[in-house]
Amino acid sequence: MKLSKIHIFFAVFLISIIFVNAAASAQSSSVLIVPFKIHAEKELLFLKKGIQDMLKSRLSREGEIMPLNKDIPGQYLETADNMDEKNAALLGAELNADYVVYGSLTVFGKSISTDAVFFNVKNNKADIIFNKSGKDNGDVIKHINEFAARINDKISGTGTVFPAAGLETKSQEDESRRHPDSLWKDTVKEDKKNKPPALINSGSLGTIWKSRRFKTQIKGLAAGDVDGDSQQEIVFIDNKDVNIYRYSNKMFTKIGEIKGDMHDNLISVDIADINGNDKSEIFVTCLNKSNKALRSFVLEWNGTQFEHIIKSAGWYYRVLDIPGRGPMLMGQKRGFNKNFIPGIDELKWSAGQYIPVTPQKLPSRTNVYSFNYGDIMNNGQMAAIMFSETEYLRVLNTDGSKEWESAEPMSGGAVFLEYDSESSGSFGAEKEQERQYLPHRILIADINKDSKNEIIVGQNTDSAGRFFSKLRLYKSGHIKCLGWDDFGLNIKWKTPEVSGYISDYALTDIDSDGRDELIFSVVKKISSVLGEAQSFIAFQEID
């Protein structure tokens, strides 16, 4: 009998411990994060969701604080759109939240202000009232980090000491938190005593030439002989115009310009002689801003000017220069509310049109801008190389199996396509658009003439760490040359880092010295409330 009582006593004791622990774990404070009001131009409205996601990730501490993982019901949306302490108390009580976070972000001219409140529902008062100003849009990330840290400190009571406003320490000058408009005012410091990085076993990068700055945002470039004079021209695009330049006698001279209209959104440019008349065509992919329909076009020199030989084509164009096979024109269609319809075709010239002739055997989610073909492993076998949707670089075998994948994302393109999705929010009658960023082109060539192919890819550094799905804040970029070895693709050399971002690149003998140069465009500054866009083009010798 005594033994039974002892067993009962211990059983009750153990059960009480289990319930006490369960109760303790359930005592996490719940916080309702109300979407911030954004007072800014339309292009910054997507930060509403971005700030909410940042706060959710920074205010998740098991056993201490946990954001409510649910949307505000429709009957409370008007209340949430007019937040004050009274409405915070109402929403918190109705949605069973211990705390409510709300605030606003205001962008005016060159300044930004973040106002936020951490409201205690039980005590019916604001525990934290936060206000910080900054000089550029990138400061909002720093503000949200500090606000979240203050909340975590309030809940956990760790006694964290925060610097006084205006007293910035050196460690706080984290470039990953800065907006590109401020970063692009600076130049990447280069040690003049250090030469550019060397090629492994094969020479080095040589001298570099840089053009004047253009007051536009260069979105893409291509190189080729577009007027049949046996010299290479550079063609580049911005949002709506096509510009054609020639480099001769160390001068970069405009020889043509094709103006677009306000409804054009140019996506890409390529050059190749696909119709076989010894003059390279200029292939320009163009979207109509109003209805998102493709209206791509092709230009060709007629002896006196560049004329349209194709207008309003429903294709995304991309030219692949495949070692041993030459240039191939690829095309892909656009769908209704879809950026790409699965399926890529080789296009050839026939009866005054570029028509699909050969479907490409590629994974269904591949888009026309994300791949190339070549003897990448230098084993005599043709293989596909492509960027995944998350921009990991992959090499596929002839049977479609994955041979190699990069350890981290590469590329970092700045050109994007917009589309509607079920998760898209709305602002009044206007539906928010999601963005699909297009990767850089992949070049394959035997650069150092050793009968082995190399891969050229660009890479830009996003100062926000790709946290925002709809915004990339590039602070710098470079171009890599990769070569195949026993472990896969590895870096053979890379260009010096440049501030801003690399938008496109090509390999061509621009100065007619018998050797290809690396041509690339750099955007130093995008057009914004802080000023005009700035870009330049550079030629890098490969010795």
Image (cartoon, rainbow, N blue to C red):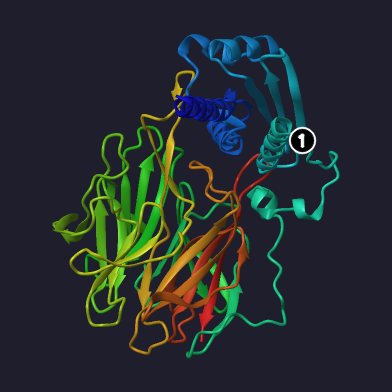
Left or right: where does residue 213 sit relative to residue 338? right
Residue 370 horizontal/vertical position (percent): 34, 58
Quadrant housing residue 235? bottom left
Q: Residue placed at 49% from the left, 52% from the top?
A: 414
Residue 142 horizontal/vertical position (percent): 69, 42
Q: Residue placed at 53% from the left, 45% from the top?
A: 467
Q: Nearer the viewer, residue 326 or 37?
A: 37
The residue under label 1 is: 133
Quadrant housing residue 21? top right
Q: Nearer the viewer, residue 357 or 81?
A: 81
Q: Residue placed at 13% from the left, 57% from the top?
A: 351
Q: Nearer the viewer, residue 109 or 488?
A: 488
Q: Please rate how many residues cluster around mark 1, counting C-alpha atoms within 10 Å: few if below 14, some from 14 to 19, many from 20.
A: some
Above or below, 517 against 394 in this view is below
Image quarter (top left, top right, bottom left or bottom right) of the N terminus: top left
Above or below, 82 against 190 in this view is above
Residue 245 horizontal/vertical position (percent): 49, 65
Left or right: where does residue 213 sit relative to residue 315? right
Q: Residue placed at 53% from the left, 25% from the top?
A: 16
Left or right: where does residue 494 sit relative to residue 115? left
Left or right: where does residue 213 sit relative to residue 303? right
Question: Does dot 1 land on a helix, a strand or a loop?
Answer: strand
Mark yes or no: residue 220 visible.
yes
Q: Amino acid at mark 1?
A: Ser
Mark yes or no: residue 301 visible.
no
Residue 179 horizontal/vertical position (percent): 65, 47
Above or below, 516 against 138 in this view is below
Q: Nearer the viewer, residue 481 or 186?
A: 481
Picture mark count: 1
